[in-house]
Amino acid sequence: MERRQHRRVPAQLQGFLLANSHEIEAITLDLSVGGARFDCDLEVYPGKVIRVRLVIPGAEEVVSIEDARVQWVGGDE
């Protein structure tokens, strides 16, 4: 059964994730109104609050999400 409220769309955007006093580069795999899936090496766990910065092509500034909450951690779905 699908639990997502919003449809996910494939999208590869450069991003940066900050947690555990480390900022690492990441790539989105998909996006929705309610979240995103990233390919990254950041060690996090469900419930962890992180900072997300996304580089949107053509935008003058990065999009910052100060209090993003990790919902799921794992390999391919």
Image (cartoon, rainbow, N blue to C red):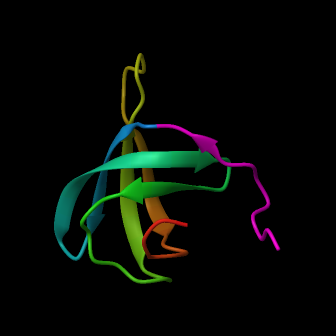
Location of residue 6 in the rendering, given as x and y in whole percent from the top left corner: 76, 53
Quarter of the image where one finds residue 41: bottom left
Q: Quadrant of the N terminus?
A: bottom right
The relative height of residue 27 versus residue 76 in the rendered view (above or below) is above
Q: Residue at x 55, y 75 (%)?
A: 71
Q: Quadrant of the C terminus?
A: bottom right
Location of residue 30 in the rendering, given as x and y in whole percent from the top left corner: 54, 47
Instruction: Describe residue 4's horizontal placement relative to residue 11 as left or right.
Output: right
- Examine the residues drawn in magenta and state their main secondary structure: loop
The residue sitting at the left extreme is: 22
Location of residue 65 in the rendering, given as x and y in whole percent from the top left corner: 46, 53
The residue sitting at the top extreme is: 58
The relative height of residue 39 versus residue 61 in the rendered view (above or below) is below
Q: Any magenta on residue 2?
A: yes
Instruction: Describe residue 4's horizontal placement relative to residue 57 as left or right.
Output: right
What stretch of residues is rendered in magenta? Answer: 1-11
The relative height of residue 35 versus residue 11 in the rendered view (above or below) is below
Quarter of the image where one finds residue 42: bottom left
Location of residue 68 in the rendering, given as x and y in whole percent from the top left corner: 48, 64
Q: Residue at x 74, y 49 (%)?
A: 7
Q: Any magenta on residue 68?
A: no
Instruction: Describe residue 58's horizontal placement relative to residue 2 as left or right.
Output: left
- How many marks on residues? 0
The relative height of residue 65 versus residue 73 in the rendered view (above or below) is above
Q: Residue at x 42, y 71 (%)?
A: 75
The residue sitting at the front extreme is: 76
